[in-house]
Amino acid sequence: MDPDRIATWGFFYSSGIALEAAAFDKRIKAVIVQGLMPEWYLNDDDQEALIARAVQDRANQLRGNPPEYIPLLDEKGEHILYFKYLAMMEPKDQATLPNWIPVAKKAAPTFRDSMTVQSFYRHAKWKPVHLFPSVSPTPVMIVTPEHDEIVPPKYQKSIFDSMQSPKKKLQIVKDKGHQNFLSVDIDTLLAEQLAFLKDVFEF
């Protein structure tokens, strides 16, 4: 491995993780993120109750009890909108969220359609967006769906504009949203990303 040509690549949730890693670790020489999700915090109306539930769950586990899980679908078959970005979606977009579960199970038979309460608690604390300025001077490329219904494209663009990296690039994927982002010609989508890496790494 060439230590001078290390790049991280993040997709949706992992995009924030990729930028966070680049902010801390300067061995990373380039970062590409698609469908940027800069933070993944809880809905304000639910946060206090969920954190209290997580504290109680931690105490229960110390007593030897198993961790508490929360299903991703409630008893009505509706998606639990504990996450702020999901709660802010338009109703027509929220209606498509339960479809993620059978698709995920088909793609990964071992997928569990539930999360621990502790996972929700950790999501509540994870707000890496304030670290993104520290990515500089690492080159960064942000790929944004034009009609992203989860994270507003204007917000993604504002983050791109705030980046101080000398080499940075914004790619807008036309006529696509967060949920149908990859229903495009993958070769075309990746071509610009590869061109970015070739420019940064000079190969």
Image (cartoon, rainbow, N blue to C red):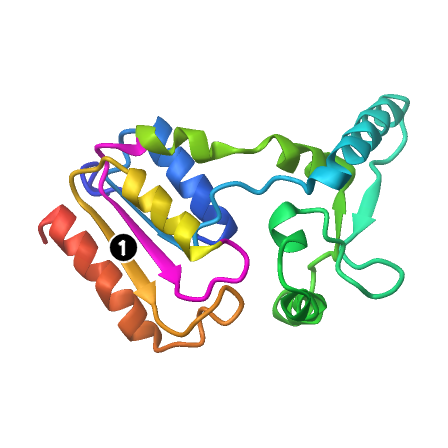
Q: Nearer the viewer, residue 46 or 196?
A: 46
Residue 70 vertical placement versus 119 (above, below): below
Q: Which residue in the protein does label 1 denote?
A: 170
- Per the image, is 150 magenta? yes
Left or right, 28 with reference to 176: left
- Density class for disc 1 (Cα within 10 Å; few <14, some 14-19, many ≥20) is some
Tell me the residue at 45%/69% (across/down). 181
Residue 132 vertical placement versus 186 (above, below): above
Q: Position of residue 154 (x, y in %)?
A: 40, 53
Residue 85 vertical placement versus 28 (above, below): below
Tell me the residue at 23%/35% (across/down). 164
Q: Nearer the viewer, residue 7 or 120?
A: 120
Q: Nearer the viewer, residue 152 or 177?
A: 152
Left or right, 185 with reference to 136: right
Q: Position of residue 193 (x, y in %)?
A: 25, 59
Q: Position of residue 3 (x, y in %)?
A: 21, 36
Residue 158, picture quadrant: top left
| Region in magenta | 135-151
Tell me the residue at 65%/34% (across/down). 124
Residue 18, picture quadrant: top left
- Per the image, is 201 magenta? no
Image quarter (top left, top right, bottom left or bottom right) of the N terminus: top left
Q: Position of residue 191 (x, y in %)?
A: 23, 67
Tell me the residue at 14%/47% (across/down). 201
Residue 79 vertical placement versus 64 (above, below): below
